[in-house]
Image (cartoon, helix red, strand yellow):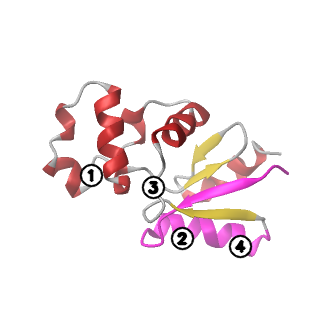
Amino acid sequence: MQKLELWHNISCSKSNCAKDFLDQNSFKISIRDYLSNPPSIAELEELLKKLNISIFELVRTGEEIYKELNLENIKDETSLIKAVLGNPILIQRPILVGENRAFIVRPPVKIEDILNNFV
């Protein structure tokens, strides 16, 4: 199996559920606490490519900071990427990242199906 990394937020129940599943099933993964170790612009752009989505699909629109910054009014990807880089809490989670693909593990019960994509 390829090297996997979980973009994880310890305060998120869904993220903890995914991590617990991976730990209990002895998957060797690295954990990235993306709040304390936020991605660079290059890493975020690479993640979007692996997810095959736009930044608009990656953003958590229910976060208070999303509303405070009026991000719903942003129409260009570059501006939204900059906002996300400054506020990584806006990134959907958890995200399982492989060498060529990545998946947002929501809901966590889909993790077994998602893992089959990395085999």
The label shown at residue 62 is 1
Secondary structure category for the residue under label 1: loop
Residue 67 placement, left or right of 38: left
**Pointer 3: residues within 10 angstroms few (<14), some, or many (20+)?**
some
Magenta part of the chain = 1-26
Q: How many marks?
A: 4
Which amino acid, by three-letter code, is at mark 1? Gly
Distance of label 4 from label 1 (alpha carbons): 29 Å
**Pointer 1: residues within 10 angstroms few (<14), some, or many (20+)?**
few
Q: Which residue is mark 3?
A: 38
Distance of label 1 from label 3 (alpha carbons): 20 Å
Distance of label 2 from label 4 (alpha carbons): 10 Å
Residue placed at 48% from the left, 72% from the top? 10
In this view, the mark in front (1 or 3): 3
Q: Which residue is mark 2?
A: 16
Residue placed at 16% from the left, 46% from the top? 69
Q: Which residue is mark 4?
A: 23
Depth order, front residue of 31/20: 31
